[in-house]
Amino acid sequence: MRLTAPPRSTSLSSLFILPIPLGLLIIAYLAAVGRRPDIPESAQVDDPHQWGFPKWYGNRPTPFDYRSTSQGEEEEICDHPKNVLLFIDDSPQIPSALTLHSSITSSNRFNLTTISSFSPTWNSDLLPKENLQNAGCDQFDWIWKVGDDSGHADLGCGEGKVIRVEEGMRIPGRANVSLLTQPHHILKPEHKHDALKTTHGEGWELGLWTHVLPSSYPRPKIFYPSRRITNRRSIVYFPLRTTATKDYPKLPWGRTWSIYSPSRRSPPSPKAGEDPFSPNSRWRKFWLKEEERLAKAMRDAGICLFEGWQYGELDDRIAKAMLSGCIVATVPPQTHHDAFSSLILPLATPSSVSILPDLPVDNLNQLLHKYTNSQLQRLTLNAFISARNRLVPPSRLKGVESAVHIWEDGGRGYDFKEGFRWDCDSGHGGWCG
């Protein structure tokens, strides 16, 4: 005979009572979390992998942002702003030129007028210098030319108080102030004083040659990092917009590598009478969307590898990546080497530098095996902080202003106060065997 206990009767009221203690526990937990002290910002900066990124990491202002004035002070109202004529040549530098345009427009130190080969007032039957003269270029304090796709070096417009600033020029040496895209370009034979004099004739005089750090879009509305967790070991290769797809390098097998495909579409032609540089123009919106698409690809990537990585050059693409929270893999830049070499994944210089070398797959795999996730997150944050301080348009614009002031005070020659490094491992340099 088996004795069994009768089944316990479950009180209906107990079913309603049981959730009450559980709810009280949840409330107590949430109250404890709410009273938990905030994680110190210094701890988040030191180890974002463990403590998370600071609240300002993203598209907010940061304590490290570049400021032209001391903290707490407001920029003085400029009573006599400079009148600037910005001449944008039709070249691959259009995105950088638009960054410059926005930067000058947002500053109260300048009154800006813009002209280009696709402006409604441009006469294609005339030379560039004739178009500039028709725009009244002699009445401006500065003439700033970006790009030299046309190959014309002579802008005309007389001398006197007119300051001509050029960058990206194909035929250098005719400007009062020449901005080199890389400071070591001063080592090129065609940039030596004797070579320039031979090119431009005996009546030519040397202006001021200098370098200013690159920059990205003026406000963190486009290039900013994502706060969500990103796979720091995913690698995206970014070819130049001008590189044909057939020349893209072959990617290794697996999900780790991918390639960004720049748009092959041409920008829409401005309508008759339409200012292409107005905020609502189709032409400008096209380039803005291109930049937004690029920024998203950088935000979603863990590591950015750019075409030309083997040259170790610091340019606006690196600025955009750092501002977007993407770790840059490149040969350590010779420009501001001490400041930026610790903010990138340092690739070895290829044994033979070619225009399109093989991808540094083994080199990157070794580096990623060496770096911990914590180190990669810290690298991301440190690069972002540095970029928000040094690779933004207000900082670059201030550097150009300083160079112009040096020229106005009689400065001539090659001005590189911060110096630059160019070692024999880079494969260049007149003193290397």
Image (cartoon, helix red, strand yellow):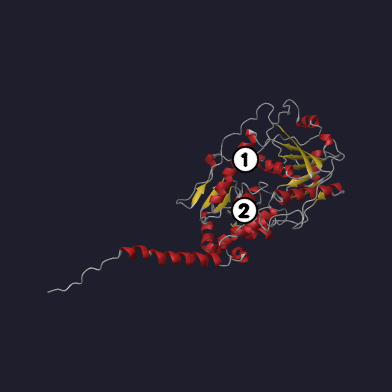
Label 2: state its secondary structure: helix
> In the image, is 250 to the left or to the right of 215?
left
Give whichever of 234, 41 is nearer the camera.
41
Q: Position of residue 285 (x, y in %)?
A: 62, 37
Q: Position of residue 64 (x, y in %)?
A: 68, 58
Give whichever of 77, 330 is nearer the camera.
77
Mark 1 highlights which residue? 288
Specify the label residue 21 is tagged with. Answer: none
Mark closer to the observer (2, 1): 1
Q: How far apart in space, not on screen, are marks 2 and 1 (Cα)?
A: 19 Å
Q: Position of residue 257 (x, y in %)?
A: 49, 51
Specify the label residue 322 is tagged with. Answer: 2
Q: Residue at x 47, y 50 (%)?
A: 252
Q: Residue at x 48, y 53 (%)?
A: 256
> In the image, is 283 to the left or to the right of 256?
right
Q: Amino acid at mark 2?
A: Met
The answer to which image quadrant residue 159 occupies is: top right
Check if mark 2's residue and mark 1's residue have beta carbons within 8 Å. no
